[in-house]
Amino acid sequence: MKENITYAGFWIRFLASLLDTLFLAVPVGILIYFLSDGAWFDFSQFGQNMANAMNGNPHAMNVTPHTSTKWELLFEVAVLSVTMIFWKKWRGATPGKKLLNVKIVDAKTFQDISNKQAIIRSFGYILSSLPFLFGFIIAAFRRDKRTFHDFLAQTAVIYDDRDVSSF
């Protein structure tokens, strides 16, 4: 077992996820939206719903914007693929984690995660979101700050003791 492990807490992980949304999911989403020629998500209906809601219309969200399952699936696979590429290149880090000097490791050996762990962890995010983000919130109350998807994949998020300049 590695000495001097410092587990990354709830808020640093939250911030890393927020940064990854900006650096990974948003650019991939924009690309998918344009590749789909707007068929992935009906932003005009969404904008109309938001405008109606802001004007106090209690039925503003009754009409759901059209989405394409095919393009949504492509988006999810693309984000997963890009994330796994970063995990491999940066040894368990994505851009958000790299900026905040944290990384994902095997929970027992503290070594790099395997592809199997990466895939399990990624799908585990869905389960961590149900119900009411409970799988994420449990990290705030644990000494090792592990989430439900960490348990599923047998991973942990720790502060990276390597030189940050390797960015």
Image: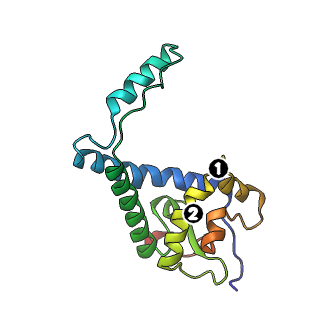
Name the residue type under label 1.
Answer: Leu
- Residue situated in front as seen by the camera: 71 or 35: 71
Choose the circle earlier in sequence order: 2 or 1.
2
> What residue sits right under mark 1 in the picture?
133
Q: Quadrant location of the N terminus?
A: bottom right
How far across and down, in percent of the image, does residue 158 sit?
A: 63, 69
Q: Quadrant location of the C terminus?
A: bottom left
Helix, strand or loop at label 1? It is: loop
How far across and down, in percent of the image, does residue 143 sit?
A: 77, 65
Q: Residue at x 38, y 61 (%)?
A: 77
Q: Residue at x 46, y 71 (%)?
A: 87
How far across and down, in percent of the image, does residue 109 sit?
A: 64, 84
Task: Give the side of residue 25 with respect to residue 144, left or right.
Answer: left
> What residue sits right under mark 2 in the picture?
124
Q: Which mark is residue 147?
A: none
Helix, strand or loop at label 2? It is: helix
- Residue situated in front as seen by the camera: 106 or 132: 132
Mark yes or no: residue 28 visible: yes
